[in-house]
Amino acid sequence: MNNLLLPLQFINEILSKITFFIAMAIVCVMVLALSASALTRYISGHGFDWFIELPPALVSWLVFPMLGPLLKTGNHIEVDFVSTILSAKNIKYIKFFVYLISFISSFIFFKAGLEATLLFYNLGQMMELEIDVPIWIMFLSFPVGFIIMGLFSLELLLTTSIEIYKDRFP
């Protein structure tokens, strides 16, 4: 199992750095777009609608690719009162179950996201912005994000399995 884990950890480390960089860039673009909107409205009295419409259009590219890295770092939303009443051994079993559900659901959502992306690609619909942007580009964030989440879930699943195995057979 370790033979599979090392390359997966290496790939996930690179994916993590890329997704965090892209997330920072998206947040920067969002802030700059809203600032530019406010500035142009202040100076000229009217602004460009696409400055205001751009941040919501980028949200899916901010959220979905970050699911995997946030799961691995533990920076996602979680309820941690259970850890105060369970032993460390039982917590590992719960984490294993969570990572298994995460792994399975990531492929279900990947499939659904891919189908939606292909549908909107084939329809050729555009987002209703001042700038013509195909809708499928926004929907592409779903399969991209969930395949990344699947890779991170697999790594966490394997790591937790190894920890459970070491606890049972020291």
Image (cartoon, rainbow, N blue to C red):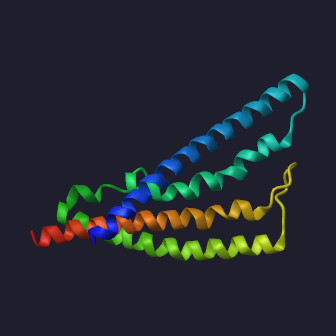
> Picture quarter containing residue 21?
top right
Nearest to the observer: residue 55 or residue 152: 152
Instruction: State the residue lying farthest toward the top.
Output: 43
Q: Is residue 71 visible?
A: no
Question: Quick check: 101 above or below 46?
Answer: below
Indicate the quadrant containing the C terminus: top left, top right, bottom left or bottom right.
bottom left
> Picture quarter containing residue 141?
bottom right
Instruction: State the residue lying farthest toward the left.
Output: 170
Q: Is residue 91 visible?
A: yes
Indicate the quadrant containing the N terminus: top left, top right, bottom left or bottom right.
bottom left
Q: Residue at x 28, y 60 (%)?
A: 82
Q: Residue at x 57, y 54 (%)?
A: 63
Question: Quick check: 67 above or below 131?
Answer: below
Q: Residue at x 90, y 32 (%)?
A: 46
Question: Quick check: 5 above or below 41?
Answer: below
Q: Residue at x 57, y 41 (%)?
A: 24
Number of marks in picture? 0
Name the spot of residue 18 as percent of width and height, x first: 53, 50
Name the spot of residue 121 as percent of width and height, x first: 77, 70
Nearest to the observer: residue 3 or residue 35: 3
Nearest to the observer: residue 86 or residue 113: 113
Name the spot of residue 17 as percent of width and height, x first: 48, 48
Name the spot of residue 15 as percent of width and height, x first: 49, 55
